[in-house]
Image (tube, rainbow, N blue to C red):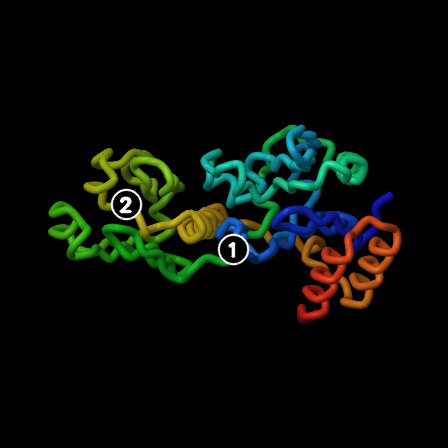
Amino acid sequence: MWRMGDVLAGNHAVWEFDSDSVLIRFARGMRTPRLFHALGSRRIPFEAVSNVTVTVTAGKRDTVVLRALPRPGADPLMDAAAGQLKEACDPYRLVLPGDRAPLADAFAEEIRSRLAPDADEPASRFLVDAPQPPLQLKAYDARIAFDGSTVSFHWSRTGATGTKWKAGDQHYPLTALTGLAWSSPEGPGGHLRLLLRETGHTAADPRPDHDLAAAVFGTGYGAVHESLPFAAALLAALRGRTPVGAAARAHSGDDRLRHLSELHTAGLLTDGEYAALRDRFAAEPL
């Protein structure tokens, strides 16, 4: 049985079990997706999860994929992404060595036993904190800023079309918006579009490079690790997310280190994994 503070270490992340949530700590490294660097860590309440799956993949090296499935409407990051994230960048996915399959199964079963009775239904409010976004986002044709109440587009002299440049900078208070649409910069036509109340959700001009409520991405502009957290924070502000109090608890460093030592002694963590986690937890402020 998993206890508070028990951890499961995989590629690019460590999942720590809690009584009402899973704390996901993302690793930093050259091979780690930059989105994970930007997220740092995330606490996922069990009530924000609809199911947990475990998949074993055979190959030169067998691997196990543990994946939590977020409830629609529970996480602003995943709602903003709208299924556009590549599999390797899925923050709800943990890849483990094949010999960890029994641990992954036990971890998944423990979470399933704690899911909300209405886990199959969309959440009525956001249950997961939006990631801390950059204060400004640089797109190809604009610099986008959000001060907590207003979204501003400051057009680029070199990137913006004549339509945008002639119209001048645009400022949209949250009260004028009904939502947003994020289109990944890793695909064709990447952009961030605000949905305006006065136009009935539709853009005055469907082309993002001519829409005064949209900013266009491009190579080197609006990367996923920058634009998606920005979109998620804006979406959370639009929906007036209510903080989750119980999920914000922290555990003492001594408890974490004790649990790591127990896992290492039991052979559930290698020497390298134990040393890396011990150093990371010891360096974190309480």
Give the tally of numbered discs: 2
Q: Quadrant of residue 134?
A: bottom left
Q: Quick check: marks 2 and 1 in contact, CB under 8 Å?
A: no
The quarter of the picture where the C terminus appears is bottom right
* Residue 248 sits in quarter: bottom right
Which three-letter amino acid code belongs to the residue tagged 2?
Val
Residue 243 locus on image (x, y percent): 61, 54
- Dot 1 surroundings within 10 Å: few (below 14), some, or many (20 or more)? few
**Regarding mark 1 in the picture, which secondary structure is present there?**
loop
**Which sits in the foreground, 115 or 199?**
115
Q: Which residue is mark 1?
A: 30
Q: Is 254 situated left or right of 238 in this image? A: right
Q: Name the residue: 83% across, 46% down.
A: 2
Disc 2, SS: strand
Where residue 8 sits: x, y (%)?
74, 48
Left or right of 273, for residue 236: left
Report which residue position mark 2 lands on. 216
Residue at position x 57%, y 58% from top?
28
Q: Which mark is residue 268?
A: none
Q: What residue type is disc 1 on?
A: Met
Quadrant for the N terminus in the image: top right
Q: Give me the residue at 62% from left, 40% from top.
A: 93
Examine the rendering and report whether any part of residue 121 can be seen: yes
| Mark nearer the viewer, 2 or 1 | 1
Compare residues 277 and 126 and report the one nearer the observer. Answer: 277
Bin the neighbour count of mark 2 within 10 Å (Cα to Cα): few under 14, some 14-19, many 20 and up: many
User: Which mark is first along the chain, 1 or 2?
Assistant: 1
Q: For this view, does 254 lie left or right of residue 15?
A: right
Q: Position of residue 62 (x, y in %)?
A: 69, 34
x and y, in percent, of residue 162 in the image: 11, 47
Q: CA distance from mark 2 to mark 1?
A: 28 Å
